[in-house]
Amino acid sequence: MNPPTDVLVVQHVEPETTGAIGAALTGAGLRARTVRVYAGDAVPRRLEHAGLVVMGGPMGVYEQDRYPHLRDEIALIEDALAHQAPVLGVCLGSQLLAAALGARVYPGPQKELGWYPLEWLPDARRDPLFHPIAAQSLMAFHWHGDRFDAPQGARVLARSAATPVQVFSYGTQAYGLLCHLEITASLLTAIVTAFGDEARAAGRDPTAILGEGDQFLHALSEAADAVFGGWVALAARAARTAPAP
């Protein structure tokens, strides 16, 4: 068994790293063990770590025949949920979490690429992770074309004008964020550079998206510190109570 201070991170593409999530893990003394799917790493179907983080990627949950590792990821998420381990899904990761909970994932009518505001819903003000930021307006970074229905039993915490479910929680330890709160300046540059053609095809200017980061990144970083600090505290608690290997 892996040391209980490890948190398993599933990374689908090289540009989409953990950003502010990784910084929060390091600050709490937790180590990230990264499964790099793009490099051929196998995805385990059982979680033997203090928590699970599933990052974004351009593939769709409904493309499991093309990307068989997605089936393994859903099984991994199901195992984490069954054992009440902390789970954090970002972008594609949130879609996989929703699918593991039985929700439908499907292409949206339009892509959200760039900076768009979040609208906080009442449950966010009562949520342990999101209540510190739910009273403020927040411009979040988005890079997705798919969306999902709210999983049964989940609480929808935020939406945007184009997407009914942007942030949700399930139980006390599982969170899905379709938007990217983890964005840092370097991560923003990496994603927009890697997927700039997608933005141009959707009628967005990658250079403008990068420039808007100067305006919005500071507030987003403060929000990310609060949210991910709260989630990492869940993983740290799980690490302290985990049996010794």
Image (cartoon, helix red, strand yellow):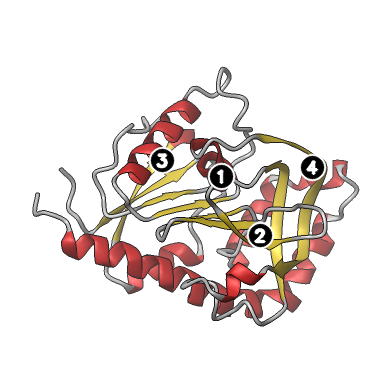
Q: Any mark on residue 189, and which?
A: 2
Q: Any mark on residue 197, and which?
A: 4
Disc 2, SS: helix
Residue beneath the point at 26% across and 49% down: 49
Few, some or many residues within 10 Å of mark 4 (<14, 14–19, 20+):
some
Residue type at mark 1?
Answer: Gln
Few, some or many residues within 10 Å of mark 3 (<14, 14–19, 20+):
many
Disc 1, SS: loop
Residue at the disc numbered 1: 152
Q: Earlier in the sequence, mark 4 or mark 3?
A: 3
Residue beneath the point at 29% across and 46% down: 83
Which residue appears farthest toward the right when viewing the image? 203
Nearer to us in this view, 104 or 141: 104
> Where, quadrant-wise, is the N terminus in this rendering?
top left
Is 5 left or right of 212, judged from the image as shown? left
x and y, in percent, of residue 217 in the image = 66, 74
